[in-house]
Image (spheres, helix red, strand yellow):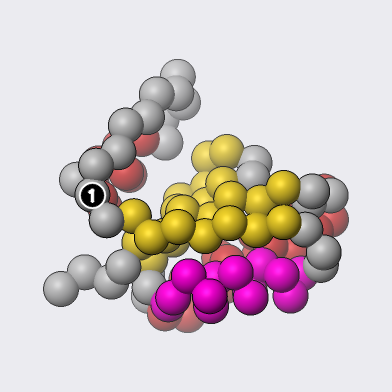
Amino acid sequence: MNPPMFVIVTDGLGDVQRNLAFEAIKSASEAAGTAWWHHFSDVWIVQGKSAADWRDLVRSTGEASVLVLELTSGWAAYSPSKGHPWLHTQFG
């Protein structure tokens, strides 16, 4: 069974705080051996943990608004970048 997937959306992160959040999310994902996606500046898609765990991790990097939603099924995206093949591979 695949670990749950979550979308993390932030608002109000400065550049330093965004970099701290990026490093925290990347480190937590790598330590757990799970995948993560970050092609939009204030959006991450991550695997594993719980919504509250991801919220608390991002909040630990400083004061900002954080929304974490579990992805259960169905999604659509468009971007001229090459970030979407990962979504198809990981999320179908």
Answer left or right for 6 relative to 88: right
Q: Quadrant of residue 65?
A: bottom right
For residue 82, which quarter of the picture? top left
Whether residue 68 can be seen here: yes
Rendered residue at 44%/75% (across/down): 50
Q: Of all residues shown, which one is farthest toward the top?
A: 80
**Residue 50 painted magenta:** yes
> Which quadrant holds the C terminus?
top left
Q: Which residue is mark 1?
A: 73
Measuring from the top left, give residue 30's x and y in whole percent: 47, 72
Q: Position of residue 55 (x, y in %)?
A: 60, 69
Mark 1 nearby-residue class (10 Å; few <14, some 14–19, many ≥20):
few
Residue toward you, 60 or 19: 60
Give above or below for 42 relative to 80.
below
Whether residue 35 is visible to the viewer of this picture, yes or no, is no
Q: Which residue reaches farthest left?
A: 1
Mark 1 lies on a secondary structure that is loop
State the image coordinates of residue 49 (x, y, percent, origin top left). 42, 77
The answer to whether 36 appears left or right of 27 in the picture is left
Q: Choose between 28 and 8: the one closer to the eye.
A: 8
Residue beneath the point at 38% across and 66% down: 47
Q: Is residue 79 magenta?
A: no
Q: Quadrant of residue 26?
A: bottom right
Q: Main secondary structure of the magenta part?
A: helix
Q: Residue at x 37, y 29 (%)?
A: 77
Location of the N terminus (image quadrant) = bottom left
The magenta segment:
49-61
Tell me the residue at 76%/69% (across/down). 61
Q: Position of residue 90 (x, y in %)?
A: 26, 52
Type of residue at label 1?
Ser
User: With 13 as the anchor, is 27 left or right in this view?
Assistant: left
The tally of labels here is 1
